[in-house]
Image (cartoon, rainbow, N blue to C red):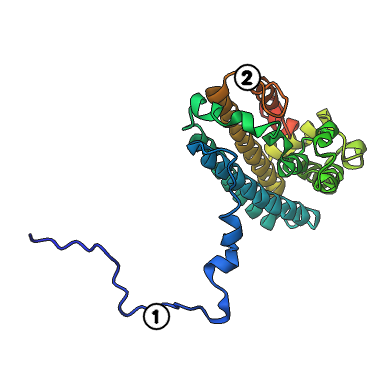
Amino acid sequence: MTDTISTSVDLSGEDVHWSPEGGLSYGRYLRLEEVLTAQTPLTDEHDEMMFIIIHQASELWMKLCLHELDAAIDCLKRGEFGPSFKMLARMARIQEQLTQSWSILATMTPADYLRFRDKLGQSSGFQSYQYRMLEYRLGNKNPAMARVHGKTKAADQVRKYLALPSIYDETLIQLSKAGFDIPSDKVERDWSEPYAQSEAVEAAWRAVYADPEKHWALYELAEKLVDVEHRFQQWRFNHMKTVERIIGYRRGTGGTGGVSYLVKALELRFYPELWTVRTSL
């Protein structure tokens, strides 16, 4: 035998902190004891653990999305476009992780899921308050959606996000500040109501896209928003196809039509003029 293959790491010469000073270890910093004991399956079925972890991990990624999105909007309000671009770019990468999670869930067969589905009762991802807050902040202002959180601790937070301007609302304010003719009812309105597309707003974006060098910050912001929405649609599509693969056209546990509802959601656009302007350029 001529080749020697190492089967363990040589720690000689390494100054490992076996007992970290101050007691702040990796596990304590991340509160892993709480995180790793938060999985409480209702059955003994093997796939339920995966089902729980996928959804818990998705909630953590959504928490980070909200963190980045809120900060990006705050930066836009101050006219700080550069930092907001970085945050939106990071959010797009987070969305890749959320989309990828469906491919893991899709390894579960219909038979696997049906072994524990009835134990879920009426619990559903439709009830995710972070998802609702994220949609509201992105621009899907549907007040009726808040009803599902009516008796939960998060209800006030959800309604707060409903009343806040979306990132597109703030973007249109920035367009107006830059001298574009944006209708007053687009920059001063009840932010809890759905946005209605406008020919005047499309005309403003057409001017931006016609001369990107002159309007570079707004042009870059528009493309960042398109990227975020594009990835959100990819997440929704993968969600729909995963549900279709696992439960077919059964109703969802939350009461929606399941796949039929998710197909309707795919038709939603957060930033209509950023899509229609592509045809009119």
Residues at marks 2 and 1, CA–CA distance in whole angstroms: 58 Å
Q: Residue at the location (74% across, 52% down)?
A: 70
Q: Residue furthest front?
A: 44
Relative to residue 37, is residue 133 depicted above or below? above
Relative to residue 45, is residue 5 depicted above or below? below
Q: How many marks?
A: 2
**What amino acid does circle 2 point to?**
Arg
Q: Residue at the location (48% across, 27% down)?
A: 109
Q: Position of residue 257 (x, y in %)?
A: 69, 21
Q: Secondary structure at mark 1?
A: loop
**What amino acid does circle 1 point to?**
Asp
Quadrant housing the C terminus? top right
Residue pointed to by mark 1: 15
Q: Position of residue 90 (x, y in %)?
A: 60, 51
Q: Which marked residue is nearer to the observer: mark 2 or mark 1?
A: 2
Residue pointed to by mark 2: 250
Q: Does 206 sit left or right of 102 as displayed?
A: right
Q: Nearer the viewer, residue 103 or 88?
A: 103
Any part of residue 214 in sight: no
Comes first in the chain, label 2 or label 1: 1
Q: Does 3 sit left or right of 123 as displayed?
A: left
Any part of residue 94 in sight: yes
Q: Position of residue 18 (x, y in %)?
A: 44, 77
Number of other residues with Cα within 10 Å of mark 1, as a class: few under 14, some 14 to 19, many 20 or more? few
Q: In terms of image quadrants, where is residue 53? A: top right
Q: Residue at the location (65% across, 44% down)?
A: 224
Q: Nearer the viewer, residue 52 or 4?
A: 52
